[in-house]
Amino acid sequence: MTTGVDNNGDGSTADRPFVNGAVVSRNFGKGTPVYDWSSFVAKRINLTERFNLELRAEGFNLTNHNNIVGRNGTWGNAATPVATYGTPLGGINNVDPGREFQFMARVRF
């Protein structure tokens, strides 16, 4: 959480805001929880004495929860935050993937 302004004149806009008469601590802001429920099933099938087939199916983020990891951390230079504080940032780097599936078939001999 930063003010987005150079309050102390050091050339950096990463100054922390004053809230309730004190500079906020490092982990003052809170985001939303991240949930990831993943699972797999696998089965090996003997085709002959030397050959076997291994099948595997995996599912990631099965609840399809929108896991936002990047948020706007600019509080502003006032006692109350700006309207965009805490809103999700755009782009694929700021959100974990949605529900995904992958499948595998392997022949061993």
Image: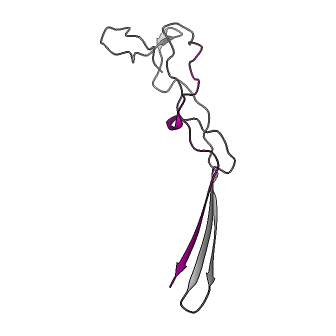
Relative height, residue 49 to residue 52 (above, below): below
Does the magenta run of residues contain 31?
no
Q: Nearer the viewer, residue 86 or 23?
A: 86
Q: Is residue 15 left or right of residue 79?
A: left
Q: Quadrant of residue 56?
A: bottom right
Q: How far across and how far down the image is residue 46, in percent?
A: 61, 86
Q: Quadrant of residue 88?
A: top right
Q: Which residue appears at 58% of the width and 44% of the height?
A: 97
Q: Nearer the viewer, residue 1 or 105?
A: 105
Q: How far across and how far down the image is residue 61, in percent?
A: 63, 49
Q: Which residue appears at 58% of the width and 35% of the height?
A: 68
Relative height, residue 90 to residue 109 (above, below): above
Residue found farthest to the left = 10
Residue found farthest to the bottom = 49
Residue found farthest to the right = 63
Magenta range is 81-109
Q: How far across and how far down the image is residue 43, in percent?
A: 64, 75
Q: Which residue appears at 34% of the width and 8% of the height?
A: 8
Coloration mode: one colour
Q: How far across and how far down the image is residue 78, in percent?
A: 52, 6
Q: Quadrant of residue 102?
A: bottom right
Relative height, residue 96 to residue 40 (above, below): above
Does the magenta run of residues contain 85?
yes
